[in-house]
Image: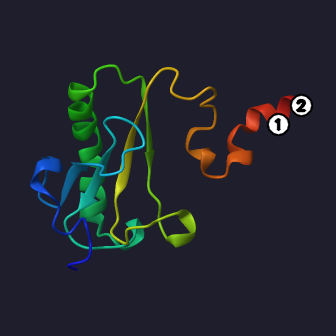
Amino acid sequence: MSSCPFCTPPADRILFEGSRVFALWDGYPVSSGHALIIPRRHVPSLFEATPEEQAELMEALPIVRARVLEAHPDIAGFNIGINDGRAAGQTVDHLHIHLIPRYAGDHPDPTGGVRHVIPEKANYLRARSQ
C-alpha cells in the first residue's frame, strides 16, 4: 500500500527491527520518545494479525522500551495503547502499538491514563469520592 506511511518507513526513524515487526519514532509524538511498534505486513487490526505477529508485537515492547529509556532516561512511566478502528481513533489503517513515555509533572492529574480518550470518564476515582 503505497499511501501507507508504515509500509515504507523512513530509515532514520527506525529504532528496532524484528522478523515480523519493527519500531520507529512517532512522526507526531505525544511526548519526547514516543515510539510505534508495527507489523511489517499491512494489517489494519490487532484482531487480524496472525498469532505470530501478535506474539512478536508483545515481545518487542520491552526491547523498544529499553531503547526509548536509553535515549530518554528521565521517563517516569509509559502509556501503551492501540487505536483499533476509526471509532477508536485509528487514523492510519495499519496496526501499530503506541509506546508513549510519561514524565513526572507532564500532566496535572494523570489518574486514569488511557481512559482519557473519553475525558469525563478518565478519573473514575474522583467520581466515587463525590
Q: Residue at x 51, y 27 (%)?
A: 106
| Tally of numbered discs | 2
Quadrant position of the C terminus in the picture = top right
Name which residue lies at 38% across and 49% down: 98
Position above or below: 87 against 118 = below
Figure quadrant of the N terminus: bottom left
| Foreground residue among 4 and 55 | 4
Is 32 situated above or below 94? above
Q: Amino acid at mark 2?
A: Gln
For disc 2, the marked residue is: 130
> What residue is pinned by disc 1?
127
**Rounded to the nearest whole Å, what is the CA distance between mark 1 and mark 2?**
6 Å
- The residue shown at (57%, 69%) is 87
Residue 55 image offset from top left, x and y in percent: 28, 56
The local crowd at label 1, few if under 14, some if 14 to 19, many if 20 or more residues have their Cα within 10 Å, is few
- For the residues labelled 1 and 2, say whether their Cβ atoms are less than 8 Å apart: yes
Label 2 Cα crowd, 10 Å radius (few <14 / some 14-19 / many 20+) = few
Q: Position of residue 80 (x, y in %)?
A: 43, 44
Image quadrant in which you'd find residue 71: top left
Q: Could you tell me the amino acid type at mark 1? A: Ala
In the rendered image, the residue lying farthest to the bottom is 1
Q: Secondary structure at mark 1?
A: helix
Label 2: element kind: loop
Q: Could you tell whether 10 is left or right of 6 in the image? A: left
Checking the image for residue 36, the label placed there is none
Left or right side of 38 for 45: right
Residue at far right of view: 130
* Res. 73 image quadrant: top left
Residue 30: x and y in percent read 42, 43
